[in-house]
Image: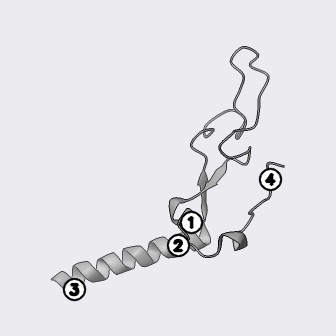
Amino acid sequence: MGWVLGLGILVAIGGYLISLRLHPFTRCRACRGLATPGRPRGSFYTYAHRRCRRCGGTNRQERLGTRLGLGGHREHLPGRGRGGH
């Protein structure tokens, strides 16, 4: 019975690592759900906006496993360095 649990844990970990490799980014928690993604609105002049400080206006962040180095080399991530410039 214990080997079934161990096998299940290995499958879950393997699935997470594959998921990190295929999808290394997640949506930015700071600016998700705004009318203009990645650009927080002004409180007084609501037509004004700025880039999000956390994601730089890209509306995405690296997942925790990717930041820890579990998803492969960070410099080889798809789309790294694009957008927000």
Residue carrying label 2 = 70
Residue carrying label 3 = 3
Q: What is the C-alpha distance between the residues marked 4 and 2? A: 24 Å
Secondary structure type for disc 3: helix
Q: What is the C-alpha distance between the residues marked 3 and 4? A: 46 Å
Secondary structure type for disc 1: helix
Mark 3 vs mark 2: give the one in front: 2
Tell me whether the residue at label 3 lies in contact with that at label 2, contact meaning CB atoms closer than 8 angstroms. no
For badge 3, the amino acid type reads: Trp
Q: Residue at x 80, y 53 (%)?
A: 83
User: As drawn, which residue projects farthest toward the front?
Assistant: 68
Q: Residue at x 60, y 71 (%)?
A: 22
Q: What is the C-alpha distance between the residues marked 1 and 4? A: 19 Å
Q: What is the C-alpha distance between the residues marked 2 and 1? A: 5 Å
Q: Which mark is residue 66?
A: 1
For badge 1, the amino acid type reads: Thr
